[in-house]
Image (tube, grey):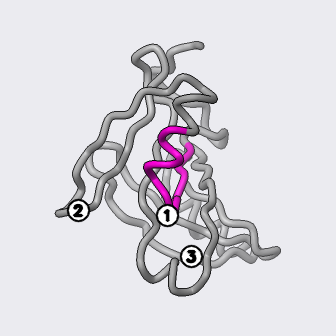
Amino acid sequence: MPEFTSHIQETPSWAELTTSDYQGDLRFCSALFGWEDEANEMSPGMYYHIQKLRGLEVAALYQQGVEEKQQGVPPYWKLYFTVDNIRKSSAQAKESGASVIFGPMEVFDAGYAVILQDSRGAVLAL
């Protein structure tokens, strides 16, 4: 597996699993991919689980929020794409028919993120 120090612009760069059973999915991903878990407490009782392969970060998973559960949203993978300018790319996405679901927001030391839904309903993140 290559180690990335940067990502090519406009290409996938991160994946997150939002799950209703993070313990079950941790076991599944560990058995299937050999991933090791690094739990990071985001707030009391809320953890962001970085998944590592051979010591390198490859993805993350976290427990689905109460609101999504109540709305019957099934677990899902979210794919992030790298862009140079998140505000400019968000505006371009909106001009192309996308809607902003959440953000842009600061994501700790990783920069900024925005969650979008394209005109056909597919969700993606920048």
Residue 41, above or below 71:
above
Rendering coords of residue 31 (x, y %): 57, 29
Relative placement, left or right, of 108 versus 33 is: left
Q: Give the mark nearer the N terminus: 2 vs 3.
A: 2
Residue 20, above or below 40:
below
Alpha-carbon span between mark 2 and mark 1 = 24 Å
Q: Residue at x 40, y 17 (%)?
A: 55
Q: Quadrant of the C terminus?
A: bottom right
Q: Amino acid at mark 2?
A: Gly
**Looking at the image, is mark 2 or mark 3 nearer the viewer?**
2
Disc ID at residue 45: 2
Relative placement, left or right, of 106 versus 53 is: left
Disc ID at residue 100: 3
Alpha-carbon span between mark 1 and mark 3 = 7 Å
Q: Is residue 28 magenta?
A: no
The region drawn magenta spans 15-27
State the residue position of label 1.
114
